[in-house]
Image (cartoon, rainbow, N blue to C red):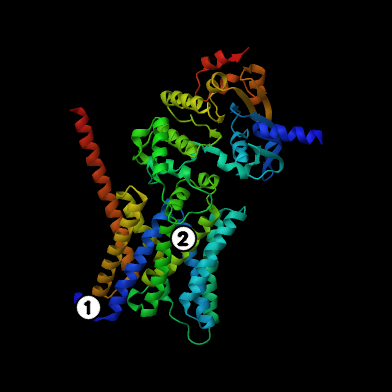
Protein backbone atom coordinates (compact mmCIF):
# COMPACT_ATOMS: atom_id res chain seq x y z
CA UNK A 1 0.00 0.00 0.00
CA UNK A 2 2.83 2.33 1.04
CA UNK A 3 4.73 1.34 -2.11
CA UNK A 4 1.75 2.27 -4.30
CA UNK A 5 1.35 5.65 -2.57
CA UNK A 6 5.06 6.31 -3.04
CA UNK A 7 4.83 5.42 -6.76
CA UNK A 8 1.81 7.67 -7.23
CA UNK A 9 3.66 10.54 -5.55
CA UNK A 10 6.63 10.02 -7.88
CA UNK A 11 4.38 10.03 -10.93
CA UNK A 12 2.71 13.25 -9.77
CA UNK A 13 6.06 15.00 -9.29
CA UNK A 14 7.62 13.76 -12.51
CA UNK A 15 7.21 15.25 -15.95
CA UNK A 16 7.94 11.83 -17.43
CA UNK A 17 7.79 8.54 -15.57
CA UNK A 18 8.73 5.45 -17.59
CA UNK A 19 8.68 2.01 -16.01
CA UNK A 20 10.07 -1.16 -17.63
CA UNK A 21 9.26 -0.03 -21.16
CA UNK A 22 9.91 -2.46 -24.01
CA UNK A 23 9.05 -1.83 -27.65
CA UNK A 24 9.42 -4.26 -30.54
CA UNK A 25 9.15 -3.61 -34.28
CA UNK A 26 8.05 -7.05 -35.38
CA UNK A 27 10.73 -9.35 -34.00
CA UNK A 28 13.28 -6.55 -33.68
CA UNK A 29 13.70 -5.16 -30.20
CA UNK A 30 13.89 -1.35 -30.31
CA UNK A 31 13.70 -0.62 -26.57
CA UNK A 32 14.47 -3.04 -23.79
CA UNK A 33 13.18 -2.59 -20.26
CA UNK A 34 13.67 1.18 -20.03
CA UNK A 35 12.94 2.89 -16.72
CA UNK A 36 13.42 6.64 -16.60
CA UNK A 37 12.13 9.41 -14.38
CA UNK A 38 12.39 13.01 -15.57
CA UNK A 39 11.46 15.71 -13.06
CA UNK A 40 9.40 18.74 -14.02
CA UNK A 41 11.49 21.62 -15.38
CA UNK A 42 14.27 19.25 -16.46
CA UNK A 43 16.35 19.71 -19.62
CA UNK A 44 17.17 16.14 -20.64
CA UNK A 45 19.49 15.26 -23.48
CA UNK A 46 19.23 11.82 -25.07
CA UNK A 47 22.14 10.48 -27.10
CA UNK A 48 22.94 7.15 -28.65
CA UNK A 49 23.90 5.53 -31.93
CA UNK A 50 21.61 5.39 -34.94
CA UNK A 51 19.04 2.66 -34.35
CA UNK A 52 19.56 2.96 -30.59
CA UNK A 53 15.89 3.73 -29.97
CA UNK A 54 16.05 7.49 -29.32
CA UNK A 55 13.27 8.42 -31.74
CA UNK A 56 11.29 5.34 -30.73
CA UNK A 57 11.43 6.47 -27.10
CA UNK A 58 10.02 9.89 -28.05
CA UNK A 59 7.30 8.25 -30.13
CA UNK A 60 6.47 5.92 -27.24
CA UNK A 61 6.12 8.96 -24.98
CA UNK A 62 3.62 10.33 -27.50
CA UNK A 63 1.76 7.04 -27.77
CA UNK A 64 2.66 6.73 -31.45
CA UNK A 65 4.22 3.27 -31.18
CA UNK A 66 2.63 0.35 -29.32
CA UNK A 67 4.34 -0.77 -26.11
CA UNK A 68 5.10 -4.44 -25.60
CA UNK A 69 5.63 -3.98 -21.89
CA UNK A 70 5.80 -1.27 -19.25
CA UNK A 71 4.02 2.03 -18.85
CA UNK A 72 4.62 5.71 -19.47
CA UNK A 73 3.10 8.61 -17.58
CA UNK A 74 3.47 12.20 -18.77
CA UNK A 75 2.51 14.75 -16.12
CA UNK A 76 0.62 12.03 -14.31
CA UNK A 77 -1.34 10.79 -17.29
CA UNK A 78 -0.85 7.88 -19.72
CA UNK A 79 0.91 9.03 -22.89
CA UNK A 80 -2.10 9.03 -25.24
CA UNK A 81 -4.13 11.10 -22.77
CA UNK A 82 -1.37 13.62 -22.21
CA UNK A 83 -0.76 14.66 -25.82
CA UNK A 84 -2.34 18.05 -25.14
CA UNK A 85 0.45 18.76 -22.65
CA UNK A 86 3.22 17.84 -25.08
CA UNK A 87 4.82 19.75 -27.95
CA UNK A 88 6.71 17.68 -30.51
CA UNK A 89 9.35 18.63 -33.06
CA UNK A 90 9.85 15.73 -35.50
CA UNK A 91 12.98 14.90 -37.43
CA UNK A 92 13.49 17.49 -40.11
CA UNK A 93 14.65 14.96 -42.72
CA UNK A 94 11.27 13.22 -42.78
CA UNK A 95 9.21 16.37 -43.33
CA UNK A 96 7.48 17.26 -46.59
CA UNK A 97 9.22 20.53 -47.47
CA UNK A 98 7.47 21.23 -50.78
CA UNK A 99 3.93 21.29 -49.43
CA UNK A 100 2.12 24.54 -50.34
CA UNK A 101 1.68 26.09 -46.91
CA UNK A 102 2.98 29.26 -45.27
CA UNK A 103 4.95 29.59 -42.04
CA UNK A 104 1.97 31.19 -40.29
CA UNK A 105 -0.38 28.41 -41.43
CA UNK A 106 2.00 25.79 -40.03
CA UNK A 107 2.28 27.62 -36.70
CA UNK A 108 -1.51 27.85 -36.51
CA UNK A 109 -1.90 24.08 -36.86
CA UNK A 110 -0.41 23.95 -33.36
CA UNK A 111 -3.78 25.22 -32.10
CA UNK A 112 -5.89 22.49 -33.72
CA UNK A 113 -8.21 20.83 -31.28
CA UNK A 114 -9.13 17.20 -30.74
CA UNK A 115 -11.37 15.55 -33.31
CA UNK A 116 -12.23 17.33 -36.53
CA UNK A 117 -13.59 20.86 -36.66
CA UNK A 118 -16.12 21.61 -39.41
CA UNK A 119 -15.65 25.11 -40.88
CA UNK A 120 -12.68 25.65 -38.56
CA UNK A 121 -11.35 29.20 -38.55
CA UNK A 122 -8.51 30.30 -36.29
CA UNK A 123 -9.42 33.12 -33.90
CA UNK A 124 -7.72 36.52 -33.98
CA UNK A 125 -6.24 35.65 -30.58
CA UNK A 126 -4.67 32.49 -32.01
CA UNK A 127 -3.31 34.41 -35.00
CA UNK A 128 -1.80 37.07 -32.74
CA UNK A 129 -0.32 34.41 -30.46
CA UNK A 130 1.14 32.53 -33.45
CA UNK A 131 2.71 35.76 -34.76
CA UNK A 132 4.16 36.43 -31.30
CA UNK A 133 5.66 32.92 -31.11
CA UNK A 134 7.15 33.19 -34.59
CA UNK A 135 8.79 36.42 -33.44
CA UNK A 136 10.02 34.69 -30.30
CA UNK A 137 11.72 31.91 -32.27
CA UNK A 138 13.27 34.51 -34.57
CA UNK A 139 11.27 34.11 -37.79
CA UNK A 140 8.53 36.72 -37.24
CA UNK A 141 9.32 38.38 -40.56
CA UNK A 142 8.80 35.15 -42.48
CA UNK A 143 5.16 34.55 -41.48
CA UNK A 144 3.80 34.68 -45.05
CA UNK A 145 6.67 32.76 -46.66
CA UNK A 146 6.06 29.33 -48.20
CA UNK A 147 7.82 26.54 -46.28
CA UNK A 148 9.51 25.46 -49.52
CA UNK A 149 11.45 28.74 -49.46
CA UNK A 150 12.83 28.29 -45.92
CA UNK A 151 16.37 27.33 -44.99
CA UNK A 152 16.93 24.31 -42.75
CA UNK A 153 17.33 26.46 -39.65
CA UNK A 154 14.22 28.52 -40.41
CA UNK A 155 12.23 25.34 -41.01
CA UNK A 156 13.29 23.94 -37.63
CA UNK A 157 12.37 27.17 -35.86
CA UNK A 158 8.95 27.03 -37.51
CA UNK A 159 8.45 23.47 -36.22
CA UNK A 160 9.45 24.61 -32.73
CA UNK A 161 6.97 27.51 -32.98
CA UNK A 162 4.22 25.05 -33.96
CA UNK A 163 5.15 22.76 -31.07
CA UNK A 164 4.92 25.51 -28.45
CA UNK A 165 1.85 27.26 -29.89
CA UNK A 166 -0.54 25.59 -27.45
CA UNK A 167 1.71 26.27 -24.41
CA UNK A 168 2.75 22.68 -23.66
CA UNK A 169 4.30 21.67 -20.36
CA UNK A 170 6.78 19.41 -22.12
CA UNK A 171 8.53 19.69 -25.47
CA UNK A 172 10.15 16.70 -27.20
CA UNK A 173 12.64 17.47 -29.96
CA UNK A 174 14.05 14.85 -32.33
CA UNK A 175 17.44 16.02 -33.64
CA UNK A 176 16.41 19.65 -34.17
CA UNK A 177 19.92 20.74 -35.11
CA UNK A 178 20.56 18.08 -37.75
CA UNK A 179 21.21 19.65 -41.18
CA UNK A 180 21.29 23.24 -39.92
CA UNK A 181 24.24 25.63 -40.04
CA UNK A 182 26.31 26.52 -36.98
CA UNK A 183 24.63 29.89 -36.50
CA UNK A 184 21.11 28.41 -36.58
CA UNK A 185 22.25 25.65 -34.22
CA UNK A 186 23.35 28.21 -31.64
CA UNK A 187 20.07 30.11 -32.03
CA UNK A 188 18.05 26.91 -31.53
CA UNK A 189 20.03 26.03 -28.39
CA UNK A 190 19.47 29.51 -26.96
CA UNK A 191 15.79 29.17 -27.69
CA UNK A 192 15.60 25.77 -25.98
CA UNK A 193 17.35 27.17 -22.90
CA UNK A 194 14.77 29.97 -22.82
CA UNK A 195 11.89 27.52 -23.25
CA UNK A 196 13.27 25.45 -20.38
CA UNK A 197 12.46 28.34 -18.03
CA UNK A 198 8.77 27.50 -18.49
CA UNK A 199 8.64 23.90 -19.68
CA UNK A 200 10.42 20.56 -19.48
CA UNK A 201 12.65 19.95 -22.50
CA UNK A 202 13.72 16.58 -23.91
CA UNK A 203 16.30 16.82 -26.68
CA UNK A 204 17.37 13.87 -28.83
CA UNK A 205 20.65 14.72 -30.49
CA UNK A 206 23.92 13.46 -31.89
CA UNK A 207 25.54 16.74 -30.93
CA UNK A 208 27.75 15.93 -27.95
CA UNK A 209 28.58 19.60 -27.49
CA UNK A 210 24.91 20.26 -26.70
CA UNK A 211 24.49 17.40 -24.24
CA UNK A 212 27.66 18.12 -22.37
CA UNK A 213 27.30 21.86 -21.97
CA UNK A 214 23.62 22.74 -22.28
CA UNK A 215 21.39 20.07 -20.76
CA UNK A 216 20.77 19.47 -17.07
CA UNK A 217 20.79 15.68 -17.33
CA UNK A 218 21.76 13.08 -19.85
CA UNK A 219 20.39 9.72 -20.95
CA UNK A 220 22.40 7.39 -23.16
CA UNK A 221 20.37 4.90 -25.11
CA UNK A 222 21.40 1.91 -27.12
CA UNK A 223 18.32 -0.31 -27.07
CA UNK A 224 18.51 -0.22 -23.29
CA UNK A 225 19.35 2.69 -21.02
CA UNK A 226 23.15 2.70 -20.71
CA UNK A 227 23.40 5.82 -18.56
CA UNK A 228 21.17 8.41 -16.91
CA UNK A 229 22.52 11.19 -14.77
CA UNK A 230 24.79 14.22 -14.82
CA UNK A 231 25.71 15.43 -18.30
CA UNK A 232 29.30 14.36 -17.93
CA UNK A 233 30.55 11.86 -20.44
CA UNK A 234 33.49 9.62 -19.85
CA UNK A 235 35.24 7.49 -22.43
CA UNK A 236 34.00 4.27 -20.87
CA UNK A 237 30.33 5.32 -21.07
CA UNK A 238 30.65 6.58 -24.61
CA UNK A 239 32.57 3.54 -25.80
CA UNK A 240 30.04 1.18 -24.27
CA UNK A 241 27.21 3.20 -25.77
CA UNK A 242 28.52 3.39 -29.30
CA UNK A 243 30.67 0.30 -29.28
CA UNK A 244 33.48 2.16 -31.00
CA UNK A 245 36.14 4.79 -30.22
CA UNK A 246 34.65 8.22 -29.63
CA UNK A 247 36.43 9.83 -32.55
CA UNK A 248 34.26 7.77 -34.91
CA UNK A 249 31.01 9.22 -33.61
CA UNK A 250 31.54 12.87 -34.32
CA UNK A 251 28.37 13.38 -36.45
CA UNK A 252 29.54 16.79 -37.55
CA UNK A 253 30.90 17.87 -34.16
CA UNK A 254 34.58 18.83 -34.34
CA UNK A 255 36.76 16.21 -32.70
CA UNK A 256 38.43 18.76 -30.48
CA UNK A 257 35.01 19.53 -29.01
CA UNK A 258 34.57 15.89 -28.16
CA UNK A 259 37.97 15.93 -26.57
CA UNK A 260 37.06 18.92 -24.43
CA UNK A 261 33.84 17.45 -23.17
CA UNK A 262 34.77 13.86 -22.54
CA UNK A 263 36.47 13.13 -19.26
CA UNK A 264 39.48 10.88 -19.70
CA UNK B 1 -19.79 24.21 -82.58
CA UNK B 2 -21.85 26.85 -80.74
CA UNK B 3 -24.88 25.65 -82.69
CA UNK B 4 -24.30 22.12 -81.35
CA UNK B 5 -24.12 23.31 -77.73
CA UNK B 6 -27.27 25.40 -78.14
CA UNK B 7 -29.37 22.82 -79.92
CA UNK B 8 -28.34 19.37 -78.80
CA UNK B 9 -29.22 18.12 -75.34
CA UNK B 10 -26.40 15.55 -75.45
CA UNK B 11 -23.85 18.34 -76.00
CA UNK B 12 -25.29 20.33 -73.09
CA UNK B 13 -25.13 17.25 -70.88
CA UNK B 14 -21.57 16.59 -72.00
CA UNK B 15 -20.55 20.17 -71.22
CA UNK B 16 -22.21 20.05 -67.79
CA UNK B 17 -20.73 16.68 -66.81
CA UNK B 18 -17.30 17.89 -67.95
CA UNK B 19 -17.61 20.93 -65.68
CA UNK B 20 -18.77 18.84 -62.71
CA UNK B 21 -16.07 16.18 -63.10
CA UNK B 22 -13.42 18.88 -63.49
CA UNK B 23 -14.53 20.47 -60.22
CA UNK B 24 -14.27 17.13 -58.39
CA UNK B 25 -10.89 16.49 -60.01
CA UNK B 26 -9.61 19.91 -58.99
CA UNK B 27 -10.50 19.35 -55.34
CA UNK B 28 -9.27 15.76 -55.05
CA UNK B 29 -6.49 15.84 -57.64
CA UNK B 30 -4.51 18.42 -55.68
CA UNK B 31 -4.88 16.41 -52.48
CA UNK B 32 -3.86 13.07 -54.01
CA UNK B 33 -0.78 14.64 -55.57
CA UNK B 34 0.29 16.25 -52.30
CA UNK B 35 -0.43 13.05 -50.35
CA UNK B 36 1.22 10.89 -53.04
CA UNK B 37 -1.87 8.74 -53.53
CA UNK B 38 -1.87 8.70 -57.32
CA UNK B 39 -1.27 4.97 -57.71
CA UNK B 40 -3.78 4.21 -55.00
CA UNK B 41 -6.32 6.29 -56.96
CA UNK B 42 -5.49 4.26 -60.07
CA UNK B 43 -6.14 1.10 -58.08
CA UNK B 44 -9.51 2.38 -56.85
CA UNK B 45 -10.50 3.32 -60.42
CA UNK B 46 -9.70 -0.14 -61.77
CA UNK B 47 -11.42 -1.93 -58.88
CA UNK B 48 -14.63 -0.16 -59.92
CA UNK B 49 -14.65 -2.19 -63.13
CA UNK B 50 -15.71 -5.20 -61.08
CA UNK B 51 -18.78 -3.20 -60.05
CA UNK B 52 -19.62 -2.38 -63.67
CA UNK B 53 -19.55 -6.11 -64.48
CA UNK B 54 -21.62 -6.95 -61.41
CA UNK B 55 -24.15 -4.29 -62.41
CA UNK B 56 -24.65 -6.01 -65.76
CA UNK B 57 -24.89 -9.43 -64.13
CA UNK B 58 -27.49 -8.35 -61.56
CA UNK B 59 -29.36 -6.09 -63.93
CA UNK B 60 -28.72 -2.90 -61.96
CA UNK B 61 -27.24 0.36 -63.23
CA UNK B 62 -23.53 -0.48 -63.80
CA UNK B 63 -22.38 2.92 -62.52
CA UNK B 64 -24.03 2.15 -59.15
CA UNK B 65 -22.09 -1.12 -59.08
CA UNK B 66 -18.93 0.84 -59.90
CA UNK B 67 -19.63 3.23 -57.01
CA UNK B 68 -20.12 0.36 -54.55
CA UNK B 69 -16.95 -1.41 -55.72
CA UNK B 70 -14.90 1.79 -55.72
CA UNK B 71 -15.98 2.67 -52.17
CA UNK B 72 -15.42 -0.87 -50.89
CA UNK B 73 -12.07 -1.06 -52.70
CA UNK B 74 -10.92 2.31 -51.36
CA UNK B 75 -11.80 1.46 -47.77
CA UNK B 76 -10.35 -2.05 -48.24
CA UNK B 77 -7.02 -0.65 -49.47
CA UNK B 78 -6.97 1.72 -46.48
CA UNK B 79 -7.70 -1.11 -44.05
CA UNK B 80 -5.12 -3.47 -45.56
CA UNK B 81 -2.55 -0.66 -45.61
CA UNK B 82 -3.15 -0.18 -41.87
CA UNK B 83 -3.21 -3.86 -40.93
CA UNK B 84 -1.13 -5.74 -43.46
CA UNK B 85 2.61 -6.11 -43.24
CA UNK B 86 2.67 -6.49 -47.02
CA UNK B 87 3.71 -3.34 -48.89
CA UNK B 88 0.84 -1.07 -49.89
CA UNK B 89 1.92 -1.22 -53.56
CA UNK B 90 1.43 -4.99 -53.50
CA UNK B 91 -2.05 -4.61 -51.97
CA UNK B 92 -2.98 -1.97 -54.56
CA UNK B 93 -1.75 -4.00 -57.52
CA UNK B 94 -3.54 -7.16 -56.33
CA UNK B 95 -6.87 -5.37 -55.81
CA UNK B 96 -6.35 -3.43 -59.08
CA UNK B 97 -6.06 -6.67 -61.05
CA UNK B 98 -8.75 -8.46 -59.04
CA UNK B 99 -11.26 -5.66 -59.78
CA UNK B 100 -10.60 -5.88 -63.52
CA UNK B 101 -10.71 -9.69 -63.46
CA UNK B 102 -14.02 -9.73 -61.58
CA UNK B 103 -15.48 -7.30 -64.10
CA UNK B 104 -14.51 -9.62 -66.97
CA UNK B 105 -15.91 -12.69 -65.15
CA UNK B 106 -19.20 -10.99 -64.22
CA UNK B 107 -19.72 -9.83 -67.79
CA UNK B 108 -18.94 -13.34 -69.08
CA UNK B 109 -21.58 -14.73 -66.69
CA UNK B 110 -24.20 -12.21 -67.82
CA UNK B 111 -26.86 -13.94 -69.97
CA UNK B 112 -27.37 -12.82 -73.55
CA UNK B 113 -25.10 -10.81 -75.79
CA UNK B 114 -22.06 -9.32 -74.04
CA UNK B 115 -22.50 -5.58 -73.49
CA UNK B 116 -20.13 -3.01 -74.97
CA UNK B 117 -17.97 -1.85 -72.07
CA UNK B 118 -15.76 0.56 -73.97
CA UNK B 119 -17.68 3.61 -72.69
CA UNK B 120 -16.84 2.56 -69.10
CA UNK B 121 -13.23 1.83 -69.91
CA UNK B 122 -12.49 4.84 -72.12
CA UNK B 123 -15.41 7.20 -71.39
CA UNK B 124 -18.05 8.66 -73.67
CA UNK B 125 -18.94 12.13 -72.55
CA UNK B 126 -21.36 12.55 -75.45
CA UNK B 127 -23.52 9.67 -74.19
CA UNK B 128 -24.25 11.12 -70.74
CA UNK B 129 -27.95 11.14 -69.90
CA UNK B 130 -29.81 13.59 -67.63
CA UNK B 131 -29.87 11.02 -64.80
CA UNK B 132 -26.15 10.38 -65.31
CA UNK B 133 -25.57 14.11 -65.08
CA UNK B 134 -27.51 14.38 -61.80
CA UNK B 135 -25.55 11.42 -60.42
CA UNK B 136 -22.21 13.07 -61.19
CA UNK B 137 -23.60 16.35 -59.81
CA UNK B 138 -24.38 14.74 -56.45
CA UNK B 139 -20.94 13.12 -56.27
CA UNK B 140 -19.22 16.41 -57.09
CA UNK B 141 -21.19 18.39 -54.51
CA UNK B 142 -20.35 15.81 -51.81
CA UNK B 143 -16.63 15.97 -52.69
CA UNK B 144 -16.59 19.79 -52.70
CA UNK B 145 -18.50 20.18 -49.46
CA UNK B 146 -16.46 17.59 -47.53
CA UNK B 147 -13.14 19.11 -48.62
CA UNK B 148 -14.36 22.64 -47.84
CA UNK B 149 -15.93 21.83 -44.46
CA UNK B 150 -12.77 20.22 -43.04
CA UNK B 151 -10.29 22.38 -44.96
CA UNK B 152 -8.05 23.37 -42.03
CA UNK B 153 -7.95 19.75 -40.84
CA UNK B 154 -7.02 18.59 -44.34
CA UNK B 155 -4.22 21.15 -44.49
CA UNK B 156 -2.68 19.97 -41.24
CA UNK B 157 -3.23 16.29 -42.13
CA UNK B 158 -1.60 16.67 -45.54
CA UNK B 159 1.41 18.62 -44.25
CA UNK B 160 2.17 16.47 -41.22
CA UNK B 161 -0.07 13.52 -40.43
CA UNK B 162 1.91 12.57 -37.32
CA UNK B 163 1.68 16.02 -35.74
CA UNK B 164 -2.07 16.12 -36.50
CA UNK B 165 -2.42 12.81 -34.67
CA UNK B 166 -0.54 14.21 -31.66
CA UNK B 167 -2.85 17.24 -31.60
CA UNK B 168 -5.73 14.77 -31.36
CA UNK B 169 -7.07 15.35 -34.87
CA UNK B 170 -9.04 12.31 -36.06
CA UNK B 171 -6.40 11.29 -38.57
CA UNK B 172 -7.85 7.85 -39.21
CA UNK B 173 -11.24 9.39 -39.96
CA UNK B 174 -9.64 11.84 -42.42
CA UNK B 175 -7.61 9.06 -44.05
CA UNK B 176 -10.66 6.88 -44.76
CA UNK B 177 -12.77 9.90 -45.70
CA UNK B 178 -10.15 10.90 -48.27
CA UNK B 179 -10.16 7.40 -49.75
CA UNK B 180 -13.96 7.53 -50.00
CA UNK B 181 -13.76 10.93 -51.73
CA UNK B 182 -11.23 9.53 -54.21
CA UNK B 183 -13.70 6.71 -54.94
CA UNK B 184 -16.54 9.21 -55.57
CA UNK B 185 -14.32 11.31 -57.86
CA UNK B 186 -13.18 8.29 -59.83
CA UNK B 187 -16.78 7.24 -60.42
CA UNK B 188 -17.66 10.80 -61.48
CA UNK B 189 -14.88 10.51 -64.07
CA UNK B 190 -15.97 7.19 -65.56
CA UNK B 191 -18.46 8.79 -67.94
CA UNK B 192 -16.02 11.52 -68.96
CA UNK B 193 -12.75 9.69 -69.62
CA UNK B 194 -13.42 6.13 -68.43
CA UNK B 195 -11.78 3.91 -65.85
CA UNK B 196 -8.51 3.40 -67.68
CA UNK B 197 -7.96 7.05 -68.53
CA UNK B 198 -9.27 8.54 -65.27
CA UNK B 199 -5.83 8.86 -63.71
CA UNK B 200 -4.78 11.44 -66.30
CA UNK B 201 -7.70 13.79 -65.60
CA UNK B 202 -7.27 13.29 -61.86
CA UNK B 203 -3.64 14.34 -61.95
CA UNK B 204 -2.99 16.51 -65.03
CA UNK B 205 -4.98 19.63 -63.97
CA UNK B 206 -3.65 19.43 -60.40
CA UNK B 207 -0.09 18.86 -61.57
CA UNK B 208 -0.36 21.80 -64.00
CA UNK B 209 -1.74 24.10 -61.30
CA UNK B 210 1.04 23.10 -58.90
CA UNK B 211 3.54 24.57 -61.36
CA UNK B 212 2.10 28.05 -60.94
CA UNK B 213 0.07 28.29 -57.69
CA UNK B 214 1.78 28.45 -54.31
CA UNK B 215 -1.03 28.00 -51.79
CA UNK B 216 -3.24 24.93 -51.43
CA UNK B 217 -6.38 27.01 -52.01
CA UNK B 218 -5.04 28.51 -55.23
CA UNK B 219 -3.86 25.11 -56.45
CA UNK B 220 -7.42 23.79 -56.08
CA UNK B 221 -8.98 26.82 -57.81
CA UNK B 222 -6.48 26.73 -60.68
CA UNK B 223 -6.89 22.95 -61.02
CA UNK B 224 -10.67 23.35 -61.35
CA UNK B 225 -10.23 26.01 -64.05
CA UNK B 226 -7.54 24.05 -65.90
CA UNK B 227 -9.60 20.84 -65.70
CA UNK B 228 -12.53 22.68 -67.27
CA UNK B 229 -10.30 23.97 -70.08
CA UNK B 230 -8.99 20.45 -70.76
CA UNK B 231 -12.39 18.78 -70.77
CA UNK B 232 -14.11 21.55 -72.77
CA UNK B 233 -11.40 21.67 -75.43
CA UNK B 234 -11.33 17.88 -75.55
CA UNK B 235 -15.08 17.79 -75.98
CA UNK B 236 -14.97 20.29 -78.85
CA UNK B 237 -12.12 18.52 -80.64
CA UNK B 238 -13.68 15.09 -80.26
CA UNK B 239 -17.03 16.38 -81.58
CA UNK B 240 -15.41 18.18 -84.50
CA UNK B 241 -13.20 15.24 -85.50
CA UNK B 242 -15.65 12.52 -84.46
CA UNK B 243 -13.09 10.84 -82.21
CA UNK B 244 -13.25 9.15 -78.81
CA UNK B 245 -13.95 11.96 -76.32
CA UNK B 246 -12.13 10.37 -73.37
CA UNK B 247 -8.97 9.76 -75.36
CA UNK B 248 -8.97 13.27 -76.82
CA UNK B 249 -9.46 14.89 -73.39
CA UNK B 250 -6.62 12.83 -71.93
CA UNK B 251 -4.23 13.55 -74.81
CA UNK B 252 -4.96 17.28 -74.56
CA UNK B 253 -4.48 17.17 -70.75
CA UNK B 254 -1.14 15.40 -70.98
CA UNK B 255 0.17 17.62 -73.82
CA UNK B 256 -0.90 20.77 -71.98
CA UNK B 257 0.80 19.60 -68.79
CA UNK B 258 4.11 19.04 -70.56
CA UNK B 259 3.75 22.36 -72.41
CA UNK B 260 3.09 24.12 -69.09
CA UNK B 261 6.05 22.31 -67.55
CA UNK B 262 8.28 23.59 -70.39
CA UNK B 263 6.93 27.14 -70.05
CA UNK B 264 7.58 27.03 -66.30
CA UNK B 265 11.17 25.90 -66.83
CA UNK B 266 11.77 28.72 -69.33
CA UNK B 267 10.20 31.28 -66.98
CA UNK B 268 12.36 30.03 -64.10
CA UNK B 269 15.51 30.33 -66.23
CA UNK B 270 14.59 33.88 -67.30
CA UNK B 271 13.91 34.78 -63.67
CA UNK B 272 17.21 33.27 -62.52
CA UNK B 273 19.11 35.04 -65.32
CA UNK B 274 17.58 38.42 -64.51
CA UNK B 275 18.31 37.85 -60.80
CA UNK B 276 21.94 36.99 -61.59
CA UNK B 277 22.18 40.07 -63.83
CA UNK B 278 20.71 42.23 -61.07
CA UNK B 279 23.20 40.80 -58.56
CA UNK B 280 26.17 41.66 -60.79
CA UNK B 281 24.96 45.26 -61.01
Mark 2 or 1, closer to the camera? 1
Q: Which residue does the image show at 22% across and 29% down from the upper left?
A: B279
Q: How far apart are marks 2 and 1 (CA)?
A: 35 Å
For marks 2 and 1 on the same chain, the one whose residue lies earlier in the sequence = 1
Q: Does the image show residue A202? A: no
Residue B18, given in percent of the width and then of the height, sits at 33, 69
Q: Which mark is residue A117?
A: none
Q: Which residue does the image show at 28% across and 70% down from the upper left?
A: B235
Residue furthest out toward the left: B281
The quarter in which the C terminus of chain A is drawn is top right
**Closer-to-camera residue (A104/A173):** A104
Residue B117, given in percent of the width and then of the height, sits at 44, 77
Instruction: Kindly identify which residue carries mark 1.
Output: B6
Residue B17, given in percent of the width and then of the height, sits at 34, 71
**Circle count:** 2
Residue A257, given in percent of the width and then of the height, sits at 52, 16
Instruction: Kindly identify which residue carries mark 2.
Output: B41
Q: Decide if residue B223 is on the left or right side of residue B4.
A: right
Q: Is residue A195 above or below residue B94?
A: above
Amino acid sequence: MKETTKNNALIEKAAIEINNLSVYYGKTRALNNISLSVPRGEYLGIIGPNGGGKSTLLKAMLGLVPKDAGDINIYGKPSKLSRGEVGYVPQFAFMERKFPITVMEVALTGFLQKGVSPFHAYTNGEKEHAAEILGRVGIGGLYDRQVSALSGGEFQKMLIARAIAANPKLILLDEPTASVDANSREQIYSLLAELNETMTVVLVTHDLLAVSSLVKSLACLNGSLVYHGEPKLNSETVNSLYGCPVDLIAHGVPHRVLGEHIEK
Amino acid sequence: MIHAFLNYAFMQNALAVGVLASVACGFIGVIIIEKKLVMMSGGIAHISYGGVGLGYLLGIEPIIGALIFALAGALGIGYLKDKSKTGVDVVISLLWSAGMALGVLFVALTPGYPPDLSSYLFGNILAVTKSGLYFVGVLTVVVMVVVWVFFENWKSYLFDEEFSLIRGVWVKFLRYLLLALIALTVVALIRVVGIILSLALLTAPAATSSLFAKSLEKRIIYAVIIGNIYSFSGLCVSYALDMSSGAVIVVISVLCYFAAFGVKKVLDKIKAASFAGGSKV
